Image (cartoon, helix red, strand yellow):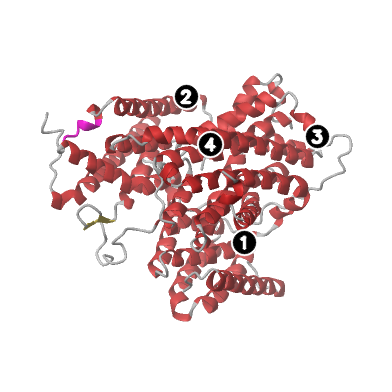
Amino acid sequence: MDIFEILSPLSVLLCFIGVFIGIIFGAIPGMTATMAIALFLPITYSLDMVDAIALLIGLYVGGISGGLVPAVLLNIPGTPSSLCTTFDGYPMTQKGEGEKALKIGITASIVGGFFSLTVLYFFAPVLASVAIKFSSVEKFLIIVFALTVIASISKGSLLGGIFSGFIGVYLSLIGMFADNNQLRLIPPGFEEELAYGFSLLPVLIGLFAIAQILQESEEGMKASPHQTFDFKKEKKNRFTFKIFNGQIINTIRSSMIGTFIGMLPGVGGSAASISSYSQAKNFSKHPEKLGTGEPEGLIASESANNGLIGGALIPLLSLGIPGDSTTAVLVGALLLQGIQVGPLFIPANPDLWDGIIYALIIANIVMFLLMFFSIKHMAKIIYIPKYIIYPIIIVMCVVGSYAINNGVMFDVWTLLLFGLAGYVFMKIGIQVAPFLIGFILGKELEKYFIDSLKGSGGDLTIFFTKGPIALLLWMLIAISIIYAIMDNRRSKKAGDQTITPST
Amino acid sequence: MKDLLTVELKFSEYHTIFPKIMLTILIFLAVLMLLLNIVKRIKKGTLTAFRFQFFIDNYDKLKFYGTVVLLIAYALVLERIGFLPASILFMFLITLLFIGNIKKKSIVVSLANSLATSLVIWYLFGQLFDITLP
């Protein structure tokens, strides 16, 4: 289909703006792509669906890519997914090769982006056409699988991860059950406000933005360490695309790892970056040099974290299950426009599906051009003080929450409540990513559970006897749990406390 | 065995089945985690040593509680005095709080930040995109 039949000039412009703002969010440590998308959701109400998705995809790509700027220049990952970029990026800056390092990272990013986009384009429709035949039993099990994977990735405590996920599910059940219109779990006195449960958007923004701001205010809102860096004239050691000679396999492998990890539900960007970095080290001809400013490590980390984007969109668009917290926010965006994600998404919304693909292409190209040619100016973003940014974010959060249901003050209170909850969660060890995925999928989980039981007359064995796909899903669930337990033991034995992925 | 694996389905009680199961699982997990923790503590011999610290060392009391109070106050007055006055006031105070001093420069910065942002958001969202503002 012709690209301009789907994307209007306005969508292209919005995509461009999205990438630009996304890079700013990504580049400021503590602010993430997830936050950027959540904050811009309110604007999308008034936009056409394709325009809205172009803006959000731009924010997503920009937000993930922008993280490399402070990672390379200040040794602070701007987003969790650029964690490993610091390992080789910062040493290069110290050697006076900052600009070169940034350009390597940007080039690796666009390769990762396009790789995952291709996989998404060919793989998601196939997966969806399989998933379309699923009955409520399989759908129930897929969500259970998603929850166990999320929990198994959450390092530290498997039980804690599962617990967090189930708390999310439990809170999502508040309100009316659609089958018999009965209210449940509502604290007395809130029957009117909570008849439909907590609104998703204020919960999301609260958990991500307000909680973050509370945490930083506890730490005294210290300015990011203003180390000075300057781009020296890099005459003898400038960036050329020749650096990528001999790195092709590394680039492709890292993109693949990123895409694959993105597909696993709930696994954050830092996991993609860490695994591809360690694989690059395993396969490297001179592994001892990694970590001292080798382009190899930089390429691995950056192509993986952009590979993540297309990967994370696969389960979202084919099964309706968000691959990470950022795509979880995208579910909110689609729901706002009245679009249900799930196996029927692609056949039912062909224009939107093409729009997403085109938006990804444009966003990746814009990201590359914007960052490659103006990186010296973009790099100054990291100097914007937080005391300017955070108040702006708070007001935008409040406006967004208030507007979500056309002016409901209770949604603003939900925002503050979950902001505080997110802050307390961080303190007591409840993990936000499993909680959020549980919260988003909780109602579906219940619906499929009840539907399955209705079909079997209340017989619980239906979940095992339904058919081969159900058994396969049980196996996957078991594998993910066993893997988590083994992995937990191994990392405890190794005393490996140095790298802990977080989302 | 058959009875154990069958759930009684009544239309009027559809809505309570799943929450009950979830609550059971949550309680089970909580007890399990508690037991594992106790076992771990007994092994290490630190059963009675509780060292849970909610706030970080030397946390910024003024900024933390200031932020919480300002957020709540903002939400309280929002519908009473309207979006623009409430936001300008709130942003001025919170920017000042985050900067952390009351020098002339900080006041100017806060004022500029609050006026610019509030007006831009008010115009962009309220007028241009027609989004409901408080």
Q: Earlier in the sequence, mark 2 or mark 3?
A: 3
Between A469 and A474, the one nearer to me in the picture:
A469
| Residue of label 2 | A490
Between B66 and A63, the one nearer to me in the picture:
A63
- The chain ID associated with circle 1 is A
Disc 2, SS: helix
| Residue of label 3 | A240
Q: Earlier in the sequence, mark 4 or mark 3?
A: 4
**Residue A460 belongs to magenta span:** yes
Disc 3, SS: loop
Q: Amino acid at mark 1?
A: Ile
Between B70 and A389, the one nearer to me in the picture:
A389
Specify the label residue A499 is tagged with: none
* Segment colored magenta: A459-463
- x, y percentage for residue B49? 40, 41
Mark 1 → mark 2, Cα distance in angstroms:
42 Å
Mark 2 → mark 3, Cα distance in angstroms:
41 Å
Contact between marks 2 and 3 (CB within 8 A): the answer is no
Numbered disc in front, either 2 or 3: 3
Q: Residues within 10 Å of mark 4 (few under 14, many from 20)?
A: some
| Residue of label 1 | A389
Determine if marks 4 and 3 fall on one subunit. Answer: yes
Specify whether A350 is left or right of B28.
right
Numbered disc in front, either 4 or 3: 4
Q: Earlier in the sequence, mark 4 or mark 2?
A: 4
- x, y percentage for residue B41? 37, 34
Mark 3 → mark 1, Cα distance in angstroms:
35 Å
Q: Is residue A502 above or below residue A382?
A: above
| Residue of label 4 | A121
Numbered disc in front, either 4 or 2: 4
